[in-house]
Image (cartoon, rainbow, N blue to C red):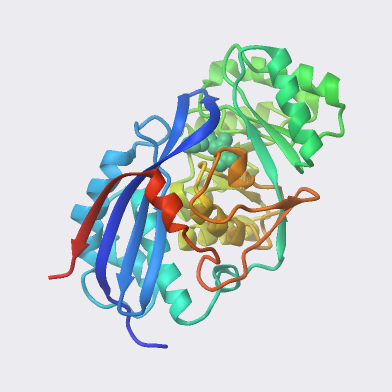
Amino acid sequence: MTGPITIERAEVRVVRLPLHKPFVTAFGVQATRELILLRLDTNRGVGWGECPTLPEPVYTSEFTGSACAAIVDHLLPRLAGPLRHPGEVTAALAGVKGHRAAKSAVEMALLDAWLRAHDLNLADCLGAVRTRVPVGVSIGIHERIDDLLADVAGKVEEGYARIKLKIKPGWDLEPVRAVRSAFGDSLPLQVDANAAYTLTDARHLAGLDRFGLILIEQPLADTDLVQHARLAARLETPVCLDESIRDAADAAAAIELGACSVVNIKPGRVGGYLEAKRIHDVCRAHGVAVWCGGLIESGLGRAANLALAGLPGFVLPGDTSPTLHYFPFDITAPFEMKDGQIDIPTGPGLGVEVNEAALEAATVTVRTLERD
Ligand code: NPG
């Protein structure tokens, strides 16, 4: 079915998924995972989007409340007319500054509806070159080294293709040293600082060089591109940027400055899957490795992230662990990891279906908007 796509009804739903255990990072403790799910009913059928903000503006400036308001008051009103293709969403929303996670949810829902109407799959549409992707896992900050080692042992046993340790000042060299000495040098290992250091910590961070890490992710503040370039020149460990990269222009600037040699791409952080692909393209053209990050998405976001991770420049395992690693239940069917890999969904659109009973069980609030 071809022809323009028009939004007829929108449902903005805040859901809360329980976590098996709190997720601890340098920016705080998440005891549950609150997400915004967006259902768009269009003249071409239904599409689902996910906005992976946190309840507070501690990872980026967005949060649940700001994203709901952005979607309802500023983004959907700009999409009242017909669109020929979801690729037109970026231009239609360009007048709204920032609010990238909110924009990503809207674009994702329109992509899902449009792809389903054309019986196309997201991975094929983005240009994926593989049918399955290697999967890494992110391990939060622990209070005790023994607990960390037990956690890592479980993940190694499950067969993850790489382990990422969250670090912060006071929890960095020692946990990495302990993991290396317990699991050996061949364990694919990287660390994520979530912007917790400053350039004055350069000498301390160089202490990580002897552990043969794949990379150190976002050691300094998101706006510190020049400082990251200085740090990168002083470390052997490759510097990867996450929070600093909001779009393809940021990626180009970071590469030009020598601020990173690896980029973590999270569609929810950069305004959607199409901008994520543009960042991939810029990095690939410059020989800069990328990998797919995670924001503890539900199965909807995870399915779309797996599709993105199938692109050729994604040469490192992503934070795409099966959602049941985090949640006792999910709103889509669970993903299965085999030999450290997950199959990219192949169905139309995002390739997964929403389980209505699970969705209702997780729902905190729903706001419905009808076209006048
Ligand atoms: O598997 O999705 C995952 C978690 C990966 O560690 C991860 N994400 O800082 O990168 C991060 C962190 C995060 C999670 C950030 C939730 C914000 C919200």
Left or right of 146 in this view: 2: left
Foreground pick, 116 / 85? 116
Picture mark count: 0
Residue 262 in sight in this render: yes
Direction front: furthest residue:
357
Residue 208 in sight in this render: no
Q: Is residue 40 above or below residue 140?
A: below
**What's the residue at 53%, 73% (across, down)?**
348
**What's the residue at 50%, 46% (across, down)?**
297
Left or right of 172 in this view: 64: left
Direction left: furthest residue:
372
Q: Is residue 176 above or below residue 71?
A: above
Left or right of 10 in this view: 47: right
Q: Quadrant of the N terminus?
A: bottom left
Q: Is residue 4 above or below residue 61?
A: below
**What's the residue at 66%, 12% (across, down)?**
144
**Percent of width and height locating residue 189:** 75, 33
**Percent of width and height locating residue 219:** 57, 28
**Percent of width and height locating residue 89:** 34, 67
**Percent of width and height locating residue 301:** 50, 53
Foreground pick, 292 / 252? 292
Q: Quadrant of the C terminus?
A: bottom left
